[in-house]
Image (cartoon, helix red, strand yellow):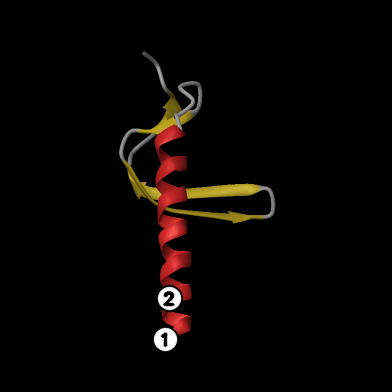
Amino acid sequence: MMDMKKNYLIASTFFIFSNVLAQNLKVNQEWWQPNGEVKVITSDSNTIYVGGTFTSVAPNIK
């Protein structure tokens, strides 16, 4: 029973802090962005690979 309460407390604390952090995040408008949905990101040494339903990745122009 004690483990269940401890797990609930840990999960609740994580949920609260993750929501607070997410509300304060802002996307840097200078970053390059895809023109569709990113479904996977992986890396190999110094290269990052991005896959999804997009046709290009370019700077965000407003």
Which type of secondary structure does the marked residue at label 1 adopt?
A: loop
The residue at 41%/51% (across/down) is 16
**Which one is nearer the viewer's eye here, 5 or 26?**
5
Give the image location of residue 27, x and y in percent. Answer: 45, 29
Residue 5 falls in image quadrant: bottom left
| Three-letter code for the amino acid on which mark 2 is drawn | Lys
Instruction: Count the numbered circles shown.
Output: 2
Q: Residues within 10 Å of mark 1 (few under 14, many from 20)?
A: few
Q: CA distance from mark 2 to mark 1?
A: 7 Å
Which type of secondary structure does the marked residue at label 2 adopt?
A: helix
User: Can you name the residue that lies furthest to the top here?
Assistant: 62
| Three-letter code for the amino acid on which mark 1 is drawn | Met
Task: Tell me the quadrant of the picture where the C terminus can be found.
Answer: top left
Residue 35 falls in image quadrant: top left
Residue 50 position (above or below residue 11): above
Specify the label residue 1 is tagged with. Answer: 1
The residue at 50%/27% (across/down) is 31
Residue 10 is left or right of residue 62, and the answer is right
Specify the label residue 29 is tagged with. Answer: none
**Which one is nearer the viewer's eye here, 34 or 26?**
26
The residue at 34%/38% (across/down) is 55
User: Can you name the residue that lies furthest to the bottom here?
Assistant: 1
**Which one is nearer the viewer's eye here, 14 or 40?**
14
The residue at 30%/39% (across/down) is 36
Specify the label residue 5 is tagged with. Answer: 2
Give the image location of residue 42, x and y in percent. Answer: 53, 55
